[in-house]
Amino acid sequence: MITVGWGAATDAGLVRTLNEDSYLAERPVFVVADGMGGHAAGEVASRIVIDEFRRLAGATDLSPDDVVAAVTRANDAIVAMGNADSEQAGMGTTVTGLAMVQASGGWHWMVFNVGDSRVYRFAGGHLDQVTVDHSEVEELVATGQISRREARVHQRRNIVTRSLGTWPAPQVDSWLLPPVLGDRYLLCSDGLPTEMEDTEISLCLGAEQDPSGTARHLVERAVALGGRDNVTALVIDVFGDEASDVDEDTTPRISPAPDAERERFDA
């Protein structure tokens, strides 16, 4: 068995009146979707993603193909609704997530992503961005035209190059990672890294054991720093049992908090 705990927080921010972010935390899937589109259509698109993934909640034999199929079904539903309602035409959403799947004869985390919402892995005191943003500024950084710091303030930083709500359906990026005792994952909409540098995100993730408190702290901090966009944070901790052990000197000291949501995945 693999025991995980999680906590989540979301806020509309200081500029927007509507929160178009949506999230799901129901084992074995954890998802953040950041909607976009006028007339509240972004909120509709992100909720379609969450409703689709909620169909996988409670699954005990999830496969990577099941996850990709859920993304595809959500995309098709968004396209169909946009075609049926002119006020929702062109709506879309990012999606990023973490799912516990059976692959290669054992449990693995499947990280998946379309758009510029992110999944980070925090382990041994180090923060790594697992996903790669599908955005114009990320392409400029990758080709050496601008620096990572310049990307944070670039005028086209909000332009995504891949999202749900397109035809044909976009390609889903994915990674398979072993569940490691002490690992902490952060799923977030782009409203969080827009306001917070990775160094501060890392400090927040390492400063507090409770995933719910950590998620609240991250969102509150992003809003305090400007809150120019909706912001959502979902923090997931791996507590153990059949999770792989790692060297004690590099294991983040994370233990289950009394008020954290906790579930076991039965192997």
Image (cartoon, helix red, strand yellow):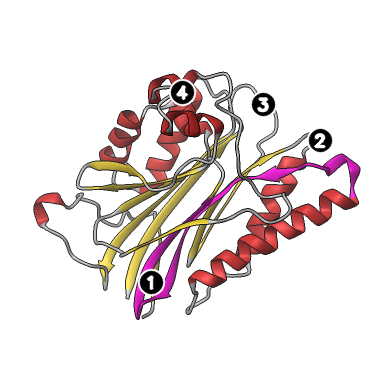
| Marks 1/3: CA–CA distance | 37 Å
Instruction: Establish if 197 lies above or below 131.
Output: above
Which image quadrant: the N terminus? bottom left
| Residue 84: % across, % down | 90, 52
* Residue range of the region highlighted in magenta in the rendering: 85-113
> Can residue 57 be seen from the camera position used here?
no
Q: Type of residue at label 1?
A: Arg
Residue identified by numbered label 4: 152
| Disc ID at residue 39 | 2
Residue identified by numbered label 3: 16
Residue identified by numbered label 1: 264
> Can residue 130 be seen from the camera position used here?
yes
Identify the mark nearer the N-term, 1 or 3: 3
Q: Main secondary structure of the magenta part?
A: strand
Identify the mark nearer the N-term, 1 or 4: 4
Instruction: Determine if the magenta segment contains residue 246.
Output: no
Q: Are marks 4 and 2 in contact (CB under 8 Å)?
A: no
Identify the mark nearer the N-term, 4 or 2: 2
Mark 2, other Cα within 10 Å: few <14 / some 14–19 / many ≥20: few
Q: Type of residue at label 4?
A: Arg
Q: Kindly state the secondary structure of the residue where label 4 is placed.
A: helix
Identify the mark nearer the N-term, 1 or 2: 2
| Residue 223: % across, % down | 50, 26
